Image (cartoon, helix red, strand yellow):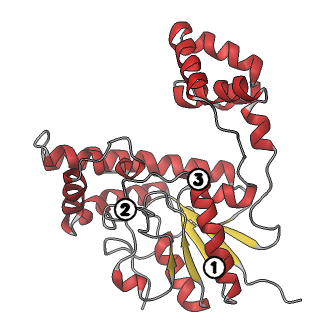
Amino acid sequence: MSASPPITLLAGATASGKSALALKLARETGAELVNADSMQIYAGMPVLTAGPTGEELAQAPHHLFGVVDAANGWSVARWLEAASAALAEIAARGRPAIVVGGTGLYLKALTHGLADVPPVSETQREVSALLYAALGEPEFRDILAELDPAAETRIEVGDRQRLLRAHAVAMATGKSLTAWQTDTRPTLAEGSWKGLVLEPPRAELYDRCDARLGLMVENGALDEVAAMEARGLDPALPALKAVGYRQLAAYLRGEISLDAALDDARQETRRYAKRQMTWFRNQTPDWERVDALAPSGSLRDPPPP
């Protein structure tokens, strides 16, 4: 029996050049691209989310880019289902696949699996929230440490949402969230994939992050944000959490100047890139590293001709 076509998982921080590298590899190998960016799955903001251009889409088959309406919020589980189906179809065609993106949880779901945690009732979530409000975080953590010591240790100070989830799951199911998450199976079979992380020098990456925001505005990001704002969507929707959206929306409402919006968005982008770099360093230590940036000069680094 012949081996399945290879799968490459290509990760990196925003503006690191992973999309350009993925497209270059796709052209060289005949691979199809599968999106692993939690913002690029949404339609309507290809510029703000640095999604593929029409020219790039024509150079290789792309999957899960701009396919979800912003009014719908996709979970990791929903992405995993769609990505698994896309990978199966690509393999059936006998072609290699490149899964490219900076959303670490998406890639981890492929390589480690996703916990099948039972749904928690709204009543239990409210009880956990009321307990947190009554006790405060330190005492709430003491209670969680008895129920799920590993979760209490790994959840950062101030991360109320994850603290509440860990408590609610333990109370509702009688089993800790950590135990549920440990009892998983990788989606991708061992030996069927290889991992690659772009890890350029931080100073150079930050310079690219700063330059990208201005180019996005020049190429229509404000029009994208204006169109989204006109829809009156719930600000809590995942699509509206795209880096830079909040600042540009505030500018369009006349609350801040464009310069102030861009300065704040640049800071947010750098912080986001730093978090991504830290995550991949900690979570994918055995993946191959590439430390060189692709040539810059456009909204998102184009592949060599």
Cα–Cα span, label 3 and label 2: 18 Å
Give the labeled residue for mark 2.
Answer: 49
Closer to viewer: mark 3 or mark 2: 3
**On screen, 284 above or below 156?**
below
Q: Residue at x 28, y 45 (%)?
A: 246
Q: Quadrant of the C terminus?
A: bottom left
Cα–Cα span, label 2 and label 1: 22 Å
Judged from the image, the secondary structure of the residue bearing numbered disc 1 is strand
The label shown at residue 133 is: none
Who is closer to the viewer here, 122 or 291? 122
Q: From the viewer's perspective, is 200 left or right of 191?
A: left
Judged from the image, the secondary structure of the residue bearing numbered disc 2 is loop
Label 2 Cα neighbours within 10 Å, binned few <14 / some 14-19 / many ≥20: many
Give the labeled residue for mark 3.
Answer: 76
The label shown at residue 97 is: 1
Q: Quadrant of the N terminus?
A: bottom right
Q: Amino acid at mark 1?
A: Ala
From the top left corner, tell me how far across and down residue 216 is, in percent.
26, 64
Q: Residue at x 60, y 48 (%)?
A: 279
From the top left corner, tell me how far across and down residue 190 is, in percent.
83, 67
Judged from the image, the secondary structure of the residue bearing numbered disc 3 is helix
Q: Amino acid at mark 2?
A: Thr
Q: From the viewer's perspective, is 32 left or right of 263?
A: right
Q: Earlier in the sequence, mark 3 or mark 2?
A: 2
